[in-house]
Amino acid sequence: MKNWFPATMALAVAVRLVAADEDWVSKELDAAAQQIEQRQFALAHDVYRNLAFVHQAAPLNAMAIQQVHNGLAATAGRLKADEARTTSAEFVERAKRLGYVQVGPAWIPPQAKERLSASAAGKLERSVQAKVCPACQGRGVSDCANCQSGIVRCMACNGTGRAGGSPITSRGAPCLICDGRGKTTCLLCKGTGFIVCPKCDGVGTVE
C-alpha cells in the first residue's frame, strides 16, 4: 500500500485566486486538510480535484497549487481507481450545502463565479466535453518513478545506514539522515508513491 504524507503537510495557507475570490480557496484547502485528518480521503480528494479544475481556468498561486498537488497525491493512494476518476455524490451534496454553483466540472461560490472572466468561465464549461487523460487513465496521478511506495535509498550513506556510506569504517555511527535505516522518504512524491499527472495537471481529463 502506498504511503501518504502526514496531514500537517496539507494544512491550509493563505492563497490568492486570480479572477476569483481568495477566501473560499483558503477555506477549501483547510477543509481538505481536516478531512484527511478524519480519514475522509475520497472527500478530500474531490476538494483538491475541484480546485485543480478551477486552476486550469483561473490560476491559483504557486503555494496553493502545490498544496493541491500534494493533496491529490496523498489521497490517491487511499482510493480505488474508480473513486479517483469520478466526483462523489458526497462532494456534490457538500458543495450544494455550501451554496456553491457548478461551472463546467467545477463547483465554486456564486461570488467567485461573478468574478470569473468570460474566457475563464468558457474554459470551464468546455472542459465538460474533455476526454479521459490517456497518461493517467483519468486518475489525475501517476506512480512515482523515483521510488518504491514512497521510499528511496538514502543518498547520504548510500543505503548502508552508516555515516560516510561504509558499514565497515563507520560501524558505530548511524547515518543521521536516515537514522540508520538506509532508506528515506522520497522527496519527489513526499512519500506518497504518486505524483500529479503532468499531462492533465491532476484533473484526469484533457481537451
Image: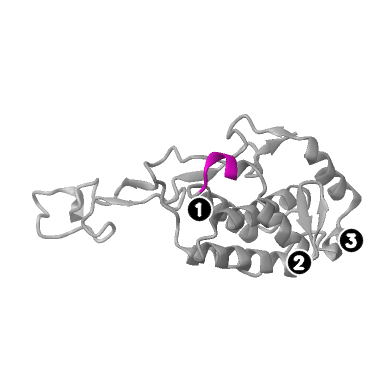
Across and down, in percent, residue 180 comes to: 21, 56
Crowding at mark 3 (Cα within 10 Å: few <14, some 14-19, many 20+):
few
> As drawn, which residue projects farthest toward the top?
134
Camera-side residue: 130 or 144? 130
Kindly identify which numbered label has been placed on residue 114: 3
Residue 160 in view here: yes
Query: Does the CB distance between marks 1 and 2 fall below 8 Å?
Result: no
Colouring scheme applied when the structure was drawn: one colour
In this rendering, position of residue 67 left or right of residue 110: left
Magenta span contains residue 137:
no
Question: Which residue is the site of mark 2?
Answer: 98
In this rendering, position of residue 2 left or right of residue 164: right
In this rendering, position of residue 152 left or right of residue 182: right
Q: Give the range drawn in magenta.
A: 79-83
In this rendering, position of residue 201 left or right of residue 116: left
Question: Which residue is the site of mark 1?
Answer: 74
Foreground label between 1 and 2:
2
Sequence-wise, the earlier of marks 3 and 2 is 2
Residue in the image at 22% along x and 57% along y = 175
Sequence-wise, the earlier of marks 1 and 2 is 1
| Separation (CA) of disc 3 from disc 2 | 16 Å
Across and down, in percent, residue 8 comes to: 49, 67
Q: Is the magenta stretch mostly helix, strand or loop?
A: helix
* Amino acid type, label 3: Glu
SS at mark 3 in the image: helix
Camera-side residue: 90 or 23? 90
